[in-house]
Amino acid sequence: MLQVKNLNSYYGKSHILQGVNLLINEGEIISLLGRNGVGRSTFIKSVMGMVDSRGSISFYGKEILGRSIHEIANIGIGYVSENRDIFPDLTVEENLELGKKENRNGVKWNTEELFDLFPNLKKRINVLGGVLSGGEQQMLTICRCLMGCPKLIMIDEPTEGLSPQMVDNVEKLLKRIASKGVSILLVEQKLTIAFNLSNRLYVMGHGKVVFEGKPEEVKKNNEIIKEWLEVS
Amino acid sequence: MSIEVLLFIIFNGLLYGMFLFMLSSGLTLIFGMMGILNFAHASFFMIGAYLGYQISLYSNFWIAIFFAPIIVGYMGAMVEKYGLRNIHKYGHIAELLFTFGLFYIIEELVQMIWGKTPVSYKVPELLNFPLIQISGMDYPAYSIFRLVLSILIFLAIYRVLSKTKTGLIIKASLTNPEIVAALGHNVPRVFSNVFGFGCGLAGLAGVMAGNVIGTEPSMALLLGPIVFVVVVTGGLGSIKGALVASLIIGMMQTAAVSLELNLNNAFQYLGFNVDVNSILNHFTSITISQLSPIVPYLLLIIILIARPRGLFGKRDV
């Protein structure tokens, strides 16, 4: 569904992504691994149209590179940023309301279904986003994105800084999203989660993809883990 | 001070405050959402006044008050869409210079079309009479009309911002426009509309006030700074802040104008007199009403020192 070919991205004069190729098929969970600063977040932002990029990004065969952010969102790509960008002055309900897109032709979700997954959000429906805990904010950003019925959801570091219990919750949610046929592109630091969930993995280093394969292949490959993944 | 004078001050303070609110509410949203310090905002106010005058000449005031703000709003939206949006990538300084240039272009154009002297833009006949008289003080029908209309407009803005999805998108864009766009909302279009709407409101303020304060090429320059005082005092992007700051400044200035007190009065009260020929008398004889033009800027300085984010703002200026 998403095919990225020879993607080069720039922040001003810095050449961040240097010829990245990546493919996501319908219903797949793909993880993008690598140390901090290798360009994983930049990759997601480039797909979303937020970074100056060259190359080709096609979604269901249509070229989307160069289109504006809201157009890309409206063809069915969801984005959950790493900063938990909830709107702090709006209530949980208003945050969710904003997630509803103009065009919702993807996999449908309704609020009740999401509240079943996170009873806490339902309890705090009228609370301002800014006063939620970090974990609740993370849930809210993911739920808000799902309200727009994306066919592909790109999630940047969803478990960063969360308690182990919240991490489990996020993992369950990701499985649930995948079970409804939504494709996921996950940027994740915790290797166990990435290995558990993903169909395939891409490992990035210095703005390039340095390895591509199934989780077992990475697990077995100590060289890759040492060279590109382990934090020494 | 008698109760009648107090009532008169409150009425005029409200009137001036609500007028400032109409001028500044659009600016604060533009400032908060786009980070654009629109130097030319008061120029749209001036265009509103001149269009109000011109359309009134050809037809009447009521047609003018309906169409002039729409035309000004459309002009504003076009300035955003074809001017500012293209300049955005060069940063805020470029935007600032753009609006600065726009200010002078509009001023020159206005002088070319309507001349350097004030035009005779008159209060509509229908409302040109004192509606109420309280112990010798006239409350003109036109002033009451202006007050009521500006209050209605405030209520309408408040309702749109708090009860509609458009309002939600605007409020969310004040914190993070990129994420709003990533949720599928056409943020550039929202920017254009808000910019146009803000300019339209300034234009409406011009149509309503041009026939009272005088329609002349320097009116934008005279009111421009005070609008920024309102925006900074209220807090960037805060409609509530703009309202409160407008009313405070309106009241303070109206009250200051009517107070003929000076420091000499205070000294007399304490039991000693300042020699009329002394140098000190130059300062102590200055009345509060003489100081009234600087009152808003004193407030600005105090706010910047004590609370840089403004009364209701979320971030520092």
Image: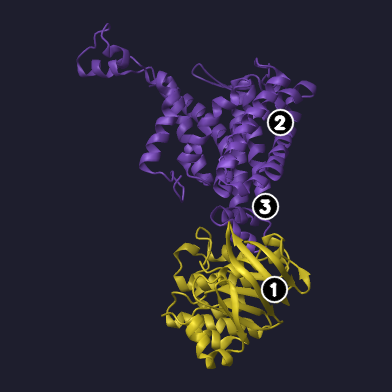
Helix, strand or loop at label 1? It is strand
The residue identified by callout 1 is: A4
Distance from the alpha carbon under mark 1 to that under mark 3: 26 Å
Q: Pointer 1 indicates a residue of which chain? A: A
Q: In the picture provided, is B275 more to the left or to the right than B51? A: left
Residue on which disc 3 sits: B188
Chain for mark 2?
B
Q: Is residue B18 above or below residue A85?
A: above
Upstream in sequence: badge 2 or badge 3: 2
The residue under label 2 is B65
Distance of label 2 from label 3 (alpha carbons):
28 Å
Viewer-nearest of labels 2 and 3? 3
The x, y position of residue A29, in whole percent, is 63, 83
Q: Quadrant of the N terminus of chain A?
A: bottom right
> How far apart in space, not on screen, are marks 2 and 1 (Cα)?
54 Å
Above or below residue B219? Residue A36 is: below
As shown in the figure, which amino acid type bears the numbered disc 3? Pro
For residue B310, what is the image quadrant?
top left
Residue B298: numbered disc: none
Count neighbours of disc 3 (C-alpha within 10 A) and say few if under 14, some if 14 to 19, many if 20 or more: some
Tell me the quarter of the image containing the C terminus of chain A.
bottom left
Please identify, in this view, whether the residue under mark 1 or under mark 3 is nearer the observer. 1
Q: Is residue B170 visible?
A: yes
Q: Residue furthest top?
A: B277
Query: Which secondary structure lies at badge 3?
Result: helix
The colour with which the image depicts chain A is yellow
Image coords of residue B231 (percent x, y): 51, 39
Among the chains pictured, the one given purple colouring is B
Front-most of A4 and B202?
Answer: A4
